[in-house]
Image (cartoon, grey):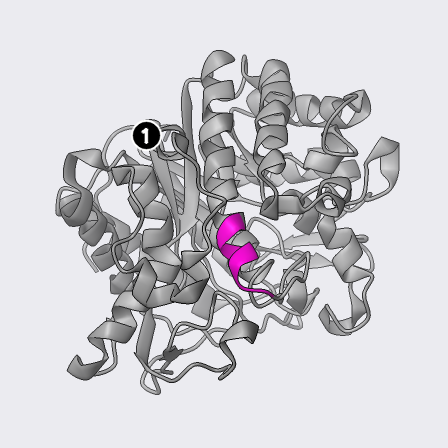
């Protein structure tokens, strides 16, 4: 295959998230999060798994920084645990928690790795959820206060900040169909949560600017959506509205999606959570937009799952996903179609033009059925092929003129995979959860060589 081309300064990185790797959920003053409470409910998470011990990163972070140094990446994207810093979501700062992230940042810088902070990767303090969580407007203001606390401590050393990671999951899985924490199944509250997440982003962006951060943006998990047949264009538009446009239109155009009434019907009519001036806060200019991408979506028209309008949730939008029998599927049963990432990135540029800020692919990777071989190593050829194909797609988007600034592999480590517990493995490093032994997989060594060939630091 032809060698791929990336511009000078292109960032190659790896990512993780606090609740998925840190463990130590009761250590040093950390408060409970919605995911701690969710995991404690029987039947919510496969195997009854919880955030303990995860990868014990809270205690073993120097070992993980060394893995990053050996990987040769330019940047490490990690999230800060809100309840570790502010145990009840507001009020007194837990200095031990904040100091942990300060030590991590210093360790990364000493290893020559640029830290990139995500402020929110789903671990809302349970005390805020008890007051309504993201259904309540007040949570957006508490989020901005939290952003200011973390930025005051770390902005002098962290150049790139992400406010929210995948707010779609927080709103629609957390407050819509209830399959993620906090496990609420309802209609309008999911749309209120989506709006308040966007408002929280805008308010936090202001707090980060006031603290002098160099770059700030948001990360969205966007779908490249295709209609199964020409007759399914309406279903595809509803899917794009629910997954993509509910975020990109307010953020990049300062308006709500044109097809929201067709998508949500009577749910969107009850929109007292929107107030004058909100869109101006939400649409404040960003320095970058993060895009998390794993698999495309093909949809067909379908009736409402719930015939009773009073019982529908905000994910019930008269479309259904169609499985592609021709594609290879990962252990998550997600179709592998790398070029669809190029199509998504090019499509964003075509749709939003000058309003689109520079892009980072902030998550991309695959869960595979990893089993260490007789030599103790995971020979994960499928993951390596997945990464190569998607990096080729990023290079294709660059060649088409899209301003993509970086790529972060997901994930550095095998970790707690939300409702799947520890049963799904995304890492380029294998983690034996019983012993906490880390073993780089073949994909780790492949990515190290790829970065070595293409990074400006090489």
- Residue 70, x across and y down, in percent: 55, 38
Left or right for 305, reference 238: right
Q: Residue at x 40, y 39 (%)?
A: 12
Magenta stretch: residue 277 in it? no
The answer to which quarter of the image holds residue 123 is: top right
As displayed, is residue 402 above or below residue 108?
below
**Residue 331 appears in view:** no
Label 1 residue SS:
loop
Q: Is the stretch drawn in magenta largely helix, strand or loop?
A: helix
Residue at left offset 65%, top offset 62%: 184
Which corner quadrant holds the C terminus? top left
Q: Quadrant of the N terminus?
A: bottom left
Q: Residue at coordinates 80% horizontally, 52% vertically from top-left?
A: 53
Q: Position of residue 357 (x, y in %)?
A: 27, 34
Q: Nearer the viewer, residue 395 or 377?
A: 395
Residue underneath mark 1:
456
Is disc 1 surrounded by few (<14), some (14 to 19) or many (20+) residues within 10 Å? some
Q: Can residue 421 be seen at all in this image of the molecule?
A: yes
Q: What is the magenta range?
A: 186-192
The vertical placement of 80 against 32, above or below, is: above
Spot occupied by residue 265 in the image (x, y as percentages of width and height): 38, 66
Is residue 337 shown above or below 68?
below
Decide which of 447, 154 is in the foreground and name it: 154
Looking at the image, residue 22 sits to the left or right of residue 221; the answer is: right
Q: Is residue 191 magenta?
A: yes
Q: How many marks?
A: 1
Q: Is residue 251 left or right of residue 75?
A: left
Give the quarter of the image for residue 18: top right
- Residue 433 pos. (x, y %): 77, 59
């Amino acid at each position: 295959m032809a060698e791929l081309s990336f511009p000078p300064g292109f960032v190659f990185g790896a990512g993780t998230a606090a609740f998925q790797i840190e463990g130590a959920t009761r250590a040093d003053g950390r408060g409970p999060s919605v995911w701690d409470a969710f995991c404690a409910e029987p039947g919510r998470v496969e195997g009854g798994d919880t955030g303990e011990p995860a990868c014990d990163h809270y205690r073993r972070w120097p070992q993980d920084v060394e893995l990053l140094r050996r990987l040769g990446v330019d940047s490490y994207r990690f999230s800060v645990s809100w309840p570790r810093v502010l145990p009840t979501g507001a009020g007194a700062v837990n200095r031990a928690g904040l100091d942990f992230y300060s030590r991590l940042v210093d360790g990364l810088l000493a290893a020559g790795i640029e830290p990139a902070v995500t402020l929110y990767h789903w671990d809302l303090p349970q005390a805020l959820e008890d007051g309504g969580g993201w259904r309540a407007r007040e949570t957006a203001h508490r989020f901005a206060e939290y952003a200011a606390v973390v930025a005051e401590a770390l902005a002098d050393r962290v150049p790139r900040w992400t406010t929210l990671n995948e707010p779609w999951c927080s709103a629609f899985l957390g407050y819509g169909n209830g399959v993620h924490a906090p496990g609420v199944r309802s209609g309008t509250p999911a749309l209120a949560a989506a709006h308040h997440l966007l408002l929280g982003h805008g308010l936090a962006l202001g707090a980060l600017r006031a603290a002098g951060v160099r770059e700030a943006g948001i990360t969205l998990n966007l779908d490249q959506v295709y209609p199964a047949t020409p007759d399914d264009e309406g279903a595809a538009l509803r899917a794009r509205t629910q997954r993509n446009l509910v975020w990109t239109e307010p953020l990049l155009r300062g308006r709500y999606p044109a097809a929201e009434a067709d998508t949500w019907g009577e749910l969107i009519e009850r929109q007292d959570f929107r107030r004058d001036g909100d869109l101006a806060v939400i649409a404040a200019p960003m320095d970058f937009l993060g895009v998390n991408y794993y698999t495309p979506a093909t949809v067909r028209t379908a009736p409402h799952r719930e015939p009773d309008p009073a019982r529908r949730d905000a994910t019930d939008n008269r479309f259904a996903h169609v499985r592609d029998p021709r594609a290879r599927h990962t252990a998550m049963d997600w179709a592998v179609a790398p070029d669809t990432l190029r199509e998504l990135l090019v499509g964003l540029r075509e749709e939003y033009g000058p309003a689109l800020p520079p892009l980072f692919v902030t998550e991309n990777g695959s869960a595979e059925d990893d089993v260490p071989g007789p030599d103790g190593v995971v020979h994960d050829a499928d993951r390596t092929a997945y990464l190569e194909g998607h990096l080729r797609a990023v290079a294709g988007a660059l060649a088409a003129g899209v301003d993509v600034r970086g790529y972060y592999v997901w994930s550095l480590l095998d970790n707690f995979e939300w409702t799947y517990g520890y049963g799904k493995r995304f890492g380029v490093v294998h983690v034996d959860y019983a012993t906490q032994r880390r073993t780089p997989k073949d994909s780790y060594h492949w990515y190290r060589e790829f970065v070595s060939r293409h990074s400006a630091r090489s």
